[in-house]
Amino acid sequence: MTIGQVTIRDTIKGLEPIMSTLEITRDLALSITASLPIGVCLAAYNGEIVYANPKAEDIFGFDIGELSGHLIEDLIPGTHRKSHRLLRENYTLSPTNIAMSGGRVLSGLKKNGVEVCLQIGLTPLSDKYILISLIESTNEIIKPSSSNDPLTGLPNRKLFDEHAERLRKLAIRNKKRISIAFIDLDNFKSVNDQFGHQIGDVLICKISRLLKSNVRESDILARVGGDEFIICLYDMKNPGI
């Protein structure tokens, strides 16, 4: 599977200033972000949110479409707003600013006034816009797991090995064939290098869903590396596939 240049153009109403450099269709961009298990916001450097996916609005208790137009600081508890604004302004001057880069945990403020602990990541998309990823700290997706990949929810190598061994024994007992398919993404590193790891994560999640929708319940799909997937296919009729 080959990935060429992956960008976004005309994805969301109001984003025309940056879309001249991007090339994914509006519907595809919306479908990618709408189904992600993490919150995704696009904000201008002045702090105004111009787009939020359904998960981001759910995290903060807003209705669909309601977050657009709010300032980022509206989602920060009052006691932290000033320091957050200063950090954000410093970040826009230097996107490599460590204090606001990926993996930072901070307090957010829901619409009903309840505070929520969030893990955030930032990726500058241009000299005007920032892509923000949001995960609730209580969300299972960021809890250490011994069996599932935290980004996609797919089995990891450990769980794959366990299931594949069971399938192997079942195939021997029933005189069936199994096949192992390895899949990696060509040029994926260039996507991360050019557009940031959050865009890379979005792409990995989309590909994971595409693969999952095209395997049978009897098959095992796992993510075993950054851009590497493996599938154990049970009862293959054609040994050449």
Image (cartoon, helix red, strand yellow):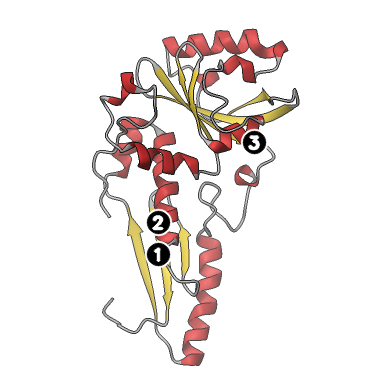
Q: Residue at x 39, y 44 (%)?
A: 203
Q: How many marks?
A: 3
Amino acid type shown at disc 3 = Glu
Q: Residue at x 52, y 85 (%)?
A: 170
Amino acid carrying mark 1 in the image: Asn
Task: Give the distance between the C-alpha atoms of the residues marked 3 and 1, in whole angstroms.
Answer: 30 Å
Q: Secondary structure at mark 1?
A: loop
Crowd rating for badge 2 (residues with CA inside 10 Å; few <14, some 14–19, many 20+): few
Tag 3 near tag 1, CB within 8 Å: no
Residue 239 lies in quadrant = bottom left
Q: Position of residue 188 (x, y in %)?
A: 31, 44
**Left or right of residue 188: residue 83:** right
Q: Quadrant of the C terminus?
A: bottom left
Quadrant including the N terminus: bottom left
Do the numbered discs 2 and 1 sit on residues whose CB atoms are within 8 Å? Answer: yes
- Cα–Cα gap, marks 2 and 3: 25 Å
How far apart in space, not on screen, are marks 2 and 1 (Cα)? Answer: 7 Å
Q: Which residue is mark 2?
A: 210
Q: Which mark is residue 214?
A: 1
Mark 3 crowd level (few <14, some 14–19, many ≥20, 10 Å Cα): many
**Badge number at residue 193:** none
Residue in the image at 27% along x and 49% along y: 186
Q: Quadrant of residue 24?
A: top left
Q: Position of residue 20 (x, y in %)?
A: 26, 24
State the mark number for residue 136: 3
Q: Is residue 138 left or right of residue 234?
A: right
Of callouts 2 and 3, the N-terminal one: 3
- Inspect this view and state whether residue 201 appears: no
Nearest to the observer: residue 114 or residue 124: 114
